[in-house]
Amino acid sequence: MSQSASSRRKPLLVVVAAVAIAAVVAVGVWRLGGDDDVTPLATAPSDTATATTPSPRASTTPTPMKKTPKATAPKKCEGPNTQFNVEGIRQESLLPDCGVAAPVTASEQKKSGLGLACGGSYPVILYKTTTTGAKTSICGRTSSGEDFRFVTKASGGQIVDLKGDYDPQLDAFVAQKDGVSYAVQAYDGTLVVEKDGRTTRQKASDWISLDNESDYD
């Protein structure tokens, strides 16, 4: 009688245990499913949040400096807007007139003589005058004027380069060639030409000397 009762209890215990295990599993699943409805207390920062754009760094490349314009070189010739020796300081040479040829080289002087801008072995312009029919320059070996050439060019003519002398009685630079005499009066720039017994005087429209004498004296 006792064995029969014990045999009937074993299946019952197995069923109760199975029901208990199923209940535990159901509670666990319910709790896991319930997490979907829970509102989080704090939201972690998202990795995809827009990052703050960093300020661009100051360029380390130096800003190129603007080039300072170079000082204008002094004029190489005497022109209508050029003031000669306004400080009254004695110069080593006058400037050639604007528009005349550049000073000749030593080889050019040997080949065809000096021009109105002088040069070669007579680089110093001691005196120059522009008259009604010609231009004339007195070209010195040095600024002392002890040795000079008389260079003149008539309008439309050829340049004449002559050995010059100074006549203190006339206060004039003089030269002669092929029976023609030339003289430039130092005090007013007048050019006097004697040819075939005739004398012509050409008044100066502009003249200047290395001694800084005015053409209005």
Image: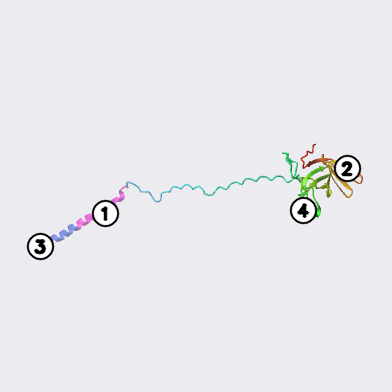
Q: Nearer the viewer, mark 2 or mark 3?
A: 2
Indicate the position of residue 48 as horizontal and vertical percent values. Answer: 40, 51
- The kind of secondary structure the magenta stretch mainly shows is helix
Secondary structure beneath label 4: helix
Packing grade of label 2 (10 A; few <14, some 14-19, many >=20) is few
Secondary structure beneath label 1: helix
* Amino acid type, label 1: Val
* Amino acid type, label 3: Ser
Indicate the position of residue 197 as horizontal and vertical percent values. Answer: 92, 45
Q: Which mark is residue 200?
A: 2
Packing grade of label 4 (10 A; few <14, some 14-19, many >=20) is some
Q: Nearer the viewer, residue 59 or 41?
A: 59
Packing grade of label 1 (10 A; few <14, some 14-19, many >=20) is few
Cα–Cα span, label 2 and label 1: 138 Å
Magenta part of the chain: 18-39
Q: Which mark is residue 106?
A: 4
> Residue at label 3?
4
> Residue at label 1?
29
